[in-house]
């Protein structure tokens, strides 16, 4: 896992190396300062030698300034390295998510992916910064300070060795108790993000059904769960500081007691035993040793918190799309011919029933095919196999005479344009949204496809025409206008296959008829598949497919189906009686 995450350091390797190097230089300066202090007290102040006082004072000031510079440089490079590492990590995760199939996204859920890209990355970033600073500083400070203290008085320095295991055992116990709580917190954050997304996405439904209080209650329950787990973890970690303070004060008391006795016994003569300056140095080293352990504990806490985040990030980075290109994928789609050979499909390998069963269908290039069926008859599932949004469970789908699994996926999808009932517009101008179909399209080309999609008339009436701003999701245009913009965007790609998945449901019948006529006359070579609930939207198609429970119930022209298909006839009669068939 660590090896995988470290790949995201990339161009910040120099900063990652420089930061710990400057930390080590800073530690060396700080460990030498107590030795200079001892010299200042014993040979300067106690001996009344002002020359030594000035010399040692100047040296102390110089060492402190150098230590400050090293510390500042270490902090600078650590900040650059951690921020750059986090930026690369987010980019790597998002890039990998873009390769995911729908099945991969369903596995993680959108809310979980968002949590991993935000909260989890921030935790790992903080941990990384602490590792290249404090995790380096603490062991070096501990080692150098112990060596220096033993060089002054090996017997008194045993106090440190006695207290270190006490702190270590305490910290390990604290971490073992706190870690499971942090793991639960991050999983609950996924639920919280999902709740917020659902609420905001369906806010009109929430308000229309007056369910605000219900939504607030559900949110509060999840938030309370996070509070309880966080509180438990933080309460456990709170024992960290009292433990460290106990060890620090215990060491000071023991040093003061035994040190004072040693000074009295030696007559404050360094040659005979311990001096005042040396005792002061030992007390300073005590603070350095135990503070280094405290910092190490903070690093362990941060690593404990970020371990769960790091695992979740690695899981996302290591996930491979369930759809992959073959060894030598083809990049040229001959035409819009579509063939289904004995196709069966299920979204889950564990499902007891197939969504599609034994589909055999041959669609010629340039044909217009209508698809109707009741809700849940797998109409959308059928067309999603064409651009290989999912792979068949059995059989095969051919486009242009080639199995879709033999194409480069990007090349195949370039030639298969899909317009969904709930297609999405992005925040930006009308032009920017349209140019998703072709980023190099001219203004004249934009106008042409918008006229085909019956969108030019309402765009021209907008304040700034094609430069008018579209809010996220297209919230500032009507459902019918949004659908026509999405159709225009798809037409701009000049695809060999155009799939309209109930994408004119919000369009009036007159506009729908004009749209079908424009596509028929302007795109004769494009294969057009139109999923619709209205018979009027498909009755002029070359053939109409009737789906029922994941199977093709009937296929033929409007007149043939009226004569031979009971399902089609019932739908037609129910709509014509209600005035919906035109």
Image (cartoon, rainbow, N blue to C red):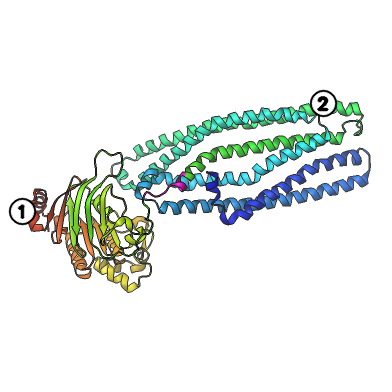
Residue at image point 47% right, 39% down: 186
Element under label 2? helix
- Relative horizontal placement of residue 170, taking residue 152 as reference (left or right): left
In the current view of this chain or complex, which residue is farthest to the left?
A: 563
Image disc number at residue 452? none
Q: Nearer the viewer, residue 301 or 392?
A: 392
Whether 407 is drawn above or below 306: the answer is below
Q: Position of residue 459 (x, y in %)?
A: 30, 66
Q: Nearer the viewer, residue 538 or 362?
A: 362
Q: Earlier in the sequence, mark 1 or mark 2?
A: 2
Q: Disc 1 versus disc 2: distance between alpha carbons?
A: 108 Å
Q: Position of residue 494 (x, y in %)?
A: 29, 67
In the current view of this chain or complex, which residue is farthest to the front?
A: 327
Specify the quadrant of the image occupied by residue 80: bottom right
Residue 522 visible in the shown view: yes
Q: Nearer the viewer, residue 492 or 284?
A: 492
Query: Which callout, 1 or 2, points to the residue nearer the camera?
Result: 1
Q: Are marks 1 and 2 in contact (CB under 8 Å)?
A: no
Mark 2 nearby-residue class (10 Å; few <14, some 14–19, many ≥20): few
Residue at image point 91% right, 45% down: 52
Mark 1 nearby-residue class (10 Å; few <14, some 14–19, many ≥20): few
Specify the quadrant of the image occupied by residue 171: top right
Q: Position of residue 572 (x, y in %)?
A: 10, 52
Whether 282 is drawn above or below 202: the answer is above
Q: Which residues are magenta?
A: 315-322
Question: Which corner quadrant holds the C terminus?
Answer: bottom left
Q: How many marks?
A: 2
The residue labelled by disc 2 is 258
Image disc number at residue 563? 1
Residue 199 visible in the shown view: no
């Amino acid at each position: 896992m660590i090896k995988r995450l470290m790949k995201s350091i990339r161009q910040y390797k120099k900063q990652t190396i420089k930061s710990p190097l400057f930390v080590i230089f800073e530690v060396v300066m700080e460990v030498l300062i107590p030795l200079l202090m001892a010299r200042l007290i014993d040979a300067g102040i106690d001996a009344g030698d002002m020359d030594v006082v000035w010399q040692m004072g100047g040296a102390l000031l110089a060492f402190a300034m150098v230590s400050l510079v090293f510390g500042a440089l270490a902090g600078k490079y650590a900040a650059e390295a951690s921020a750059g590492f986090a930026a690369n990590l987010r980019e790597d995760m998002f890039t990998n998510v873009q390769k995911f199939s729908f099945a991969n996204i369903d596995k993680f859920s959108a809310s979980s992916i968002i949590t991993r890209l935000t909260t989890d990355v921030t935790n790992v970033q903080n941990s990384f910064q602490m590792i290249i600073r404090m995790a380096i500083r603490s062991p070096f400070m501990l080692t150098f300070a112990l060596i220096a203290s033993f060089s002054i008085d090996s017997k008194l320095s045993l106090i440190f060795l006695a207290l270190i295991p006490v702190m270590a055992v305490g910290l390990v116990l604290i971490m073992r108790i706190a870690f499971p709580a942090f793991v639960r917190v991050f999983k609950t954050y996924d639920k919280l993000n999902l709740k917020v997304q659902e609420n905001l996405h369906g806010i009109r439904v929430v308000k229309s059904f007056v369910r605000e209080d219900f939504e607030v209650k559900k949110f509060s329950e999840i938030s309370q769960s996070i509070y309880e787990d966080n509180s438990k973890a933080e309460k456990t970690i709170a024992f960290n500081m009292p433990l460290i303070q106990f060890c620090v004060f215990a060491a000071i008391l023991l040093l003061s007691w035994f040190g004072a006795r040693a000074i009295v016994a030696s007559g404050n003569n360094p040659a005979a035993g311990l001096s005042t300056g040396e005792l002061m140095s030992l007390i300073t080293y005590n603070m350095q040793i135990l503070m280094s352990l405290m910092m190490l504990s903070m690093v362990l806490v941060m690593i404990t918190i970020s371990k769960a985040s790091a695992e979740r990030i690695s899981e996302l980075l290591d996930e491979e799309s369930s759809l992959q290109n073959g060894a030598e994928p083809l990049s040229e789609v001959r035409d819009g011919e579509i063939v289904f050979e004995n196709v069966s499909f299920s979204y889950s390998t564990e499902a007891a029933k197939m969504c599609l069963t034994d589909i055999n269908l041959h669609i010629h290039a340039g044909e217009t095919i209508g698809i109707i069926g009741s809700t849940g008859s797998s109409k959308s599932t059928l067309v999603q196999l064409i651009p290989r949004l999912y792979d068949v469970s059995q059989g095969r789908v051919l486009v242009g005479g080639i199995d879709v699994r033999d194409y480069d996926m990007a090349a195949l999808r370039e030639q298969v344009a899909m317009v969904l009932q709930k297609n999405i517009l992005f925040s930006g101008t009308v032009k920017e949204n349209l140019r998703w179909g072709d980023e190099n399209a001219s203004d004249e080309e934009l106008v042409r496809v918008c006229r085909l999609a019956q969108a030019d008339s309402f765009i021209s009436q907008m304040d700034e025409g094609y430069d008018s701003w579209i809010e996220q999701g297209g919230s500032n245009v009507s459902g019918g206008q949004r659908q026509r913009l999405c159709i225009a965007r798809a037409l701009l790609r000049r695809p060999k296959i155009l799939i309209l998945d109930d994408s004119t449901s919000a369009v009036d019948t007159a506009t729908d008829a004009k749209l079908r006529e424009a596509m028929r006359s302007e795109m004769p070579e494009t294969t057009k598949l139109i999923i619709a609930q209205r018979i009027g939207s498909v009755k002029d198609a070359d053939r109409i497919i009737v789906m029922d429970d994941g199977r093709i119930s009937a296929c033929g022209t409007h007149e043939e189906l009226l004569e031979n298909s009971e399902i089609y006839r019932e739908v037609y009669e129910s709509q014509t009686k209600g005035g919906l068939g035109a």
